[in-house]
Image: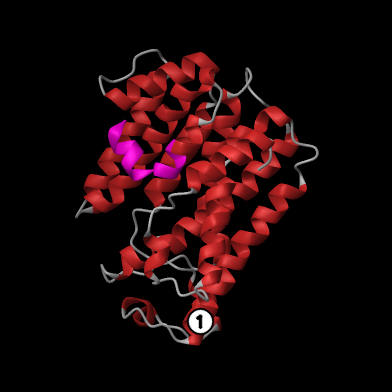
Amino acid sequence: MIIYRKRDYEGFLCSLLLPAESRTSAFALRAFNVELAQIKDSITQKTIGLMRMQFWRKAVEDMYCDNPPHQPVAIELWKAIKRHNLTKRWLLKIIDEREKNLDDRAYRNMEELETYAENTHSALLYLTLEMLDTGIRDIHADHAASHIGKAQGIVTCLRATLYHSKRQKVFLPMDICILHGVSQEDFIRANQEKNVRDVIYNIASQAHIHLEHARSFSKNVPVKAFPAFLYTVALEDYLYKIQKVDFNVFHPSLHKKSTLLPLYLYIRSWKKKY
């Protein structure tokens, strides 16, 4: 769980603000997601990545047969499944989407990035909703979760741009890059020309639109679902910061841990807003 706290610090902070009976399960779910996410960065051959994904696919199937593998994260996730009757489909969808993403190529368009985000980040939120108050099943909460997950996927892609460009890789949607006449080489060289910043502006704007959509459902979303959506605070914080530096995705300020984030999260939690 220490690795999870390091690799998903914001998710860890958000999980701390969940009701006590959901917290341990949320930690297990986030740790499971981190296990899958780090496979891509830790392999040199796709075959090895596929084998690890298959391990987790079989592990999930075995968990639902009450026979989890002797692996710390798997055992904790199995307990969460038993405690909250979590939907197996969402766990398998996350694995399937992470497996597809082992291919080292840019997203063809924004829709492809949003599909990836829906099947990973939104799926995590659907599962988190199932952990709250004996399971929140509400169409408005699901709509909000879908949009928040998409916003999170887009922001995660933006935040990883510097990390990937240093490794000669670019995953930003190609259709938006082509629209502004920007090549992958521009990002690898950390070009900060206006057309490069325009690409980032377009992508960040899409994340902002999803956040606004999610909040448009807030009057109809059960209040007990709100703790699942606190990640909006971290997304809002990043989008504000990137606007402040005129959409220069390489600016050093974007890669520092936000010291005030725990306070912002607590205030939003106290106000029962997302």
Residues rendered magenta in the picture: 1-12
Q: Is residue 146 left or right of residue 28?
A: right
Q: Which residue was labeled with disc 1? A: 178
Count of labels in the image? 1
Q: Quadrant of the N terminus?
A: top left
In the rendered image, the vertical position of residue 211 relative to residue 122, given as above or below: below
Question: Percent x, y for residue 221?
Answer: 75, 36
Give the x, y percent position of residue 111: 58, 61
Horizontal arrangement in the rendering, residue 53 relative to residue 196 (left or right): left
- Where the C terminus falls, by quadrant? top right
Magenta segment, prevailing SS (helix, strand or loop): helix
Instruction: State the residue in front, 38 or 227.
Output: 227
Q: Nearer the viewer, residue 149 or 45?
A: 149
Horizontal and vertical percent position of residue 194: 50, 86
Looking at numbered disc 1 in the image, what kind of residue is underneath it?
A: Ile
Looking at the image, which residue is at 54% across and 53% down? 235
